[in-house]
Amino acid sequence: VSEINPIITVKALGEQGLLQLLHQFCPPSIVGDDAAVIQPRPGYELVVTTDVLVDGVHFSDRTIPPEALGWRAAAVNLSDLAAMGAESIGITVGLGLPDDTSQDWIIEVYSGLSHCLRDWGGVILGGDVVRSESRILSITALGEVRPQTKILRHRAHPGEVILVTGFHGGSRAGLELLVNPTWGQDLSEAHKSQLIQLHQRPTPRINVARLLRSQSISCAGMDSSDGLADAVVQICRASQVGAVIECDRLPIHPDLLRTQSLTPAQAIDWTLYGGEDFELVLTLAPDLAKALQSQLPQGAEIIGKITAQPEIRLIRDGISVPLSQNQGFQHW
Amino acid sequence: VSEINPIITVKALGEQGLLQLLHQFCPPSIVGDDAAVIQPRPGYELVVTTDVLVDGVHFSDRTIPPEALGWRAAAVNLSDLAAMGAESIGITVGLGLPDDTSQDWIIEVYSGLSHCLRDWGGVILGGDVVRSESRILSITALGEVRPQTKILRHRAHPGEVILVTGFHGGSRAGLELLVNPTWGQDLSEAHKSQLIQLHQRPTPRINVARLLRSQSISCAGMDSSDGLADAVVQICRASQVGAVIECDRLPIHPDLLRTQSLTPAQAIDWTLYGGEDFELVLTLAPDLAKALQSQLPQGAEIIGKITAQPEIRLIRDGISVPLSQNQGFQHW
């Protein structure tokens, strides 16, 4: 049983060693006091959001390496900022770690957090590290938004159309590739790797928020973290309106139609309910939506329209059916 | 084994039920979107801090009821805001809950969070609830501070004195009463109950921050969450100065001297290293400190002075000894 273990654990590092390690990832002017001091730019409002990721519930060593986990934890929060039309100012990081967590794992996670912030804005504003049985990442992201171009859920109006950025279902397929070795084996290695990337390193749509702001476009919307269908449901509920979604218009990730592991009907289900694509679902006037669509990357699609009648219907094979509302990701 | 269980668990509530429950604790104008929008007052900077509490590490059912746990979780973070000289704007709440957590437990915790914010400022700005093996509270507090009266650790100067608010060691004694049934049995029920309160429902020193701001006093300092001695060490380290602390001046909680369970030397140790008293440790000019002390509640004491020589010494029984720096609370 006696074995030489070259891994440096948090227990071996001690609290001071751990804090010194983590401070290297933060701007020196920000950390070192009881709290970090920041300042939104004049004319901007502050936006705040929190997401907690728990080992065994939201991630596992089997499905994501630590650097990607860090990226993903930051991206999930920055997606919420983008969904408000905001820019990222930074994040605080609450870390719960078992005694035997290795220093390398922590460095990789913080590198991933830093990489996402480097690409999409913001810095690490400090946080807290504590001992816990499971590994936990609790991220709070702070952003700044112009009041005029703030994106809120409750502002959808009948007559507007629903514009969705990017493809959907790709993250769900990436996860399936990671946990089910028999799935999607008819896909090329390049396609498989791309789908896995979609799951492990999602892109927060900060660039879409910037585009909207640069053109002073005000719209309703949210991100599709809990599924494209769920986003439409939440927007309609908050705005007390309904929607009609055309299945033919859904931005199905092309790889979902390339594999025999999925029927076309299942591909539609993953597109609607797969979740974790972290794209934006926006409602706005038809002409504005078309103009915006032409400026967005591949996959952006006008999938339907907002109706006064407060129900959500799906046009599938020419038949209008009520949207199933209980297929999204449920924590309980 | 079959048993009727009238407790409503989070599993039974489901995600929507749980979110509806928690939204009742938030201002309706704040929650319901991907992120909350807030605005610090003009002329103020924003302050942000995060603390994570884990069941079995930072709290247990044996030492704290859920309402007090909520209070304490908010107070710990508001103490960090006070230690920056800030007012509270609000908190985000990241909750990790096992499946069998009862609805009542959650309501009690949120009530405690709300009570602390009602008394000391701010609102619940949303958060995240996830499934986890242990119960976890990850709180991020946002505050606003006037740049002129911001309290920072690195601004202590030789010639200044060290002013400490309140008594110390009381929280440590309260914890001992909760975990050790033989300890302090010669104390009256009123004293015991008061010490337990100090542990379970600490007061964030927002009022001290307000006093400093109202008199435009700029000083160095931090809170004594990890112990009075640790606060002096951190301030001196950040300011590259030293300090002399007089044991005769230490604000020992009077109850620590009332029980035979503690020797006077142990009472001093708990005062210096017990931790979790959440008072403020400030350094400022002697005349300012005296004027301030007279306006502070019982226990506030000038315990020593800042020196140019970068070492921390303790005058104990007329003898100057180096301060022991490794007795504070260590997470690892």
Image (tube, coloured by chain):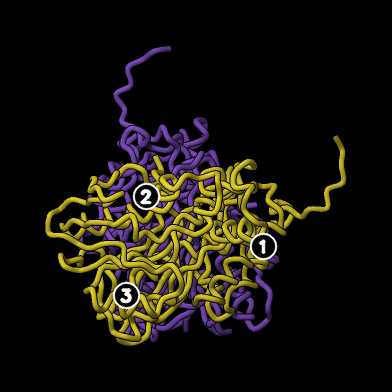
Chain colours: A yellow, B purple
Which is closer to the viewer, label 2 or label 1? 1
SS for dot 3: helix
- The residue singled out by tag 1 in the image is A108
**Residue B191's quadrant in the figure?**
top left
Q: Who is closer to the viewer here, B49 or A233?
A: A233
> Is B229 situated above or below A181?
below
Q: Chain of mark 2?
A: B
* Residue A319 relative to residue B49: left or right: left
Inspect the image, locate mark 1, and give the three-letter code of the amino acid beneath it.
Answer: Glu
Q: Could you tell me residue A82's position as x and y percent?
A: 39, 71
Q: Chain of mark 3?
A: B
Per the model, the C-alpha gap separating discs 2 and 3 is: 22 Å
Asked if badges 2 and 1 are on one and the same chain, I answer no
Against B16, residue B165 (above or below) is below
Residue nearest the viewer, comparing A244 with B195: A244
Residue linked to disc 2? B201
- Residue A252's x, y, as percent? 43, 58
**Is mark 2 in CB contact (under 8 Å) with mark 1?**
no
The residue that label 3 is drawn on is: B211
Quarter placement of the N terminus of chain A? top right
Kindly tell me whether residue B270 is visible in this rendering: no
